[in-house]
């Protein structure tokens, strides 16, 4: 059986318990209390029981604590899978978005996210989702904008004529005379 990994010497049990009391993160406080028990001379199996974990996890906590101190015992966000898009893909995508589509070549008059996904596949054989392309475009500073729809046969000055202000003073309709009964 291998020797246990030793804890760093600049902390003690009292200091770890004080840090656990002041911690706003429950799992970190639990880990600090388990390590405080080790500082007091408890067996690693006892620390595992206090923490509610196995011996291997206690060993991982000791390594993280030795490397980063109490902050090393905070839960970290999982890194997730690496992005499929590389810098070359992002640069080419930005260039295509800036240049706009050529209808004869691309078959569209304006770019949609799904069209850009198709372009990435045709150009780089890169199969990415609409969400990924949207997120990448947003990181590059692009926003989804769409023009207000306009009828193709709309006259140029029709909107301005329609928006002209009506008369400022409204006039009351003349009173109607009551109709008489025919006798």
Image (cartoon, helix red, strand yellow):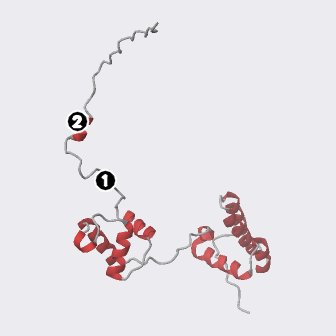
Compare marks 2 and 1 and give the one earlier in the sequence. Answer: 1
Mark 2 or mark 1, which is nearer to you? 2
Q: Secondary structure at mark 2?
A: helix
User: In the picture, which quadrant includes the N terminus?
Assistant: bottom right
The residue lying at 33 percent from left, 80 percent from top is: 122
Is the residue marked by circle 2 packed among few (<14), some (14-19), or many (20+) residues within 10 Å?
few
| Residue 179 locus on image (x, y percent) | 43, 10
On the image, the x and y values in percent for residue 24 come to: 65, 58
**Nearer to the camera, 91 or 114:** 114
In the rendered image, the residue lying farthest to the bottom is 1
Give the quarter of the image for residue 40. bottom right
Q: Is residue 150 above or below residue 101?
A: above
Q: Which mark is residue 147?
A: 1
Q: Is residue 67 left or right of residue 101?
A: right
Instruction: Determine whether label 2 and label 1 are within 8 Å by CB.
Output: no
Residue at 29% x, 68% y: name it.
108
Disc marking residue 161: 2
Judging depth in this view, the residue of 138 and 70 nearest the camera is 138
């Amino acid at each position: 059986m291998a020797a246990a990994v030793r804890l760093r010497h600049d902390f003690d049990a009292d200091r770890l318990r004080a840090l656990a009391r002041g911690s706003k993160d429950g799992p970190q406080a639990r880990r600090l209390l388990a390590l405080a028990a080790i500082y007091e001379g408890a067996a690693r199996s006892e620390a595992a029981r206090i923490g509610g974990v196995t011996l291997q996890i206690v060993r991982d906590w000791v390594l993280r604590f030795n490397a980063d101190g109490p902050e090393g015992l905070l839960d970290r966000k999982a890194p997730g899978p690496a992005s499929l898009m590389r810098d070359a893909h992002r640069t080419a995508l930005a260039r295509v978005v800036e240049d706009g589509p050529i209808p004869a070549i691309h078959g569209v008059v304006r770019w949609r996210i799904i069209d850009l996904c198709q372009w990435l596949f045709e150009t780089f054989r890169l199969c990415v989702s609409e969400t990924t392309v949207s997120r990448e475009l947003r990181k590059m500073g692009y926003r989804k904008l769409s023009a207000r729809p306009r009828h193709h046969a709309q006259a140029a000055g029709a909107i301005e004529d329609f928006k002209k202000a009506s008369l400022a003073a409204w006039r009351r309709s003349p009173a109607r005379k009551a109709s008489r009964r025919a006798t």
